[in-house]
Image (cartoon, grey):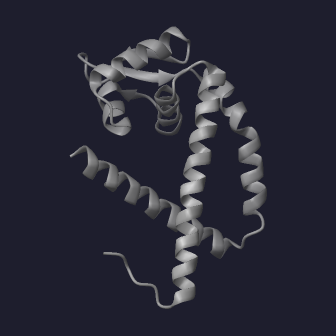
């Protein structure tokens, strides 16, 4: 059961926003696929690199939970990324039985360079909004991300 808008105009705008979000998700998916191809990794491998870039070194178990993949699939992915020179393994500083995975900074630089144009154009676009508008956009994006994570969790059971 959907939330009813206050009026027809708000309902139409909500529909347009949902459509724009769908379009953006598709375009970002395409861009990520192209970046992954360009750097010679798979799409999930690229998501792993994004996670390591944002959150820093991680265990395979934490990556498994973050990416929604089995630990076996994550181990294979880490093997591929290590062989390609994108990540390295090191002993966990607090748990001798565990291994930490960290991204190689130079390799992350190659990936980041492919997003530089989008970063610049996004920052240019943001300069056209007020601080209050940017705060509202940010709040909407954070809440939307939480909604997507929640829906993903429901689908994975």
**Closer-to-camera residue (35/93):** 35
Q: Where is residue 103 in the image (x, y as percent from the top left)?
A: 52, 24
- Residue 44 is situated, as x and y percent measured from the top left of the image, at 46, 29
Q: How many marks?
A: 0
**Could you say where residue 48 lies in the image, as x and y percent from the top left?**
46, 30
As drawn, which residue projects farthest toward the bottom?
A: 7
Q: Residue 115: percent from the left, percent from the top?
A: 69, 38
* Residue at position x 32%, y 55% in the image: 150
For this orientation, the residue located farthest to the top is 83
Residue located at (58% from left, 67% from top)? 137
On the question of residue 130 being in view, the answer is yes
Left or right position of 71 against 53: left
> Residue, x 33% and y 22% (percent of image)?
73
- Look at the picture and state if 77 lies above or below 54: above
The quadrant of the rendering that contains the N terminus is bottom left
Can residue 92 be seen here? no
Q: Is residue 126 left or right of residue 31?
A: right
Q: Which of 73 and 108 is in front in this view?
A: 73
The answer to whether residue 59 is above or below residue 156 is above
Q: In which quarter of the image is residue 92?
A: top left
123 vs 30, left or right, is right
């Amino acid at each position: 059961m959907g939330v009813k808008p206050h009026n027809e105009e708000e309902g139409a705008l909500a529909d347009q926003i949902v459509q724009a979000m769908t379009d953006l998700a598709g375009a970002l998916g395409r861009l990520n696929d192209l970046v992954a191809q360009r750097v010679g990794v798979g799409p999930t491998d690229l998501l792993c690199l994004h996670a390591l870039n944002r959150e820093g070194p991680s265990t395979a178990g934490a990556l498994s939970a973050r990416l929604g993949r089995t630990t076996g699939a994550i181990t294979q992915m880490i093997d591929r990324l290590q062989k390609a020179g994108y990540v390295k393994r090191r002993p966990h500083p607090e748990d001798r039985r565990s291994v930490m995975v960290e991204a190689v900074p130079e390799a992350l630089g190659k990936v980041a360079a492919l997003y530089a144009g989008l970063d610049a154009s996004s920052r240019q676009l943001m300069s056209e909004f007020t601080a209050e508008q940017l705060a509202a956009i940010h709040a909407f994006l954070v809440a939307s991300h939480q909604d997507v994570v929640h829906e993903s969790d429901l689908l994975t059971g």
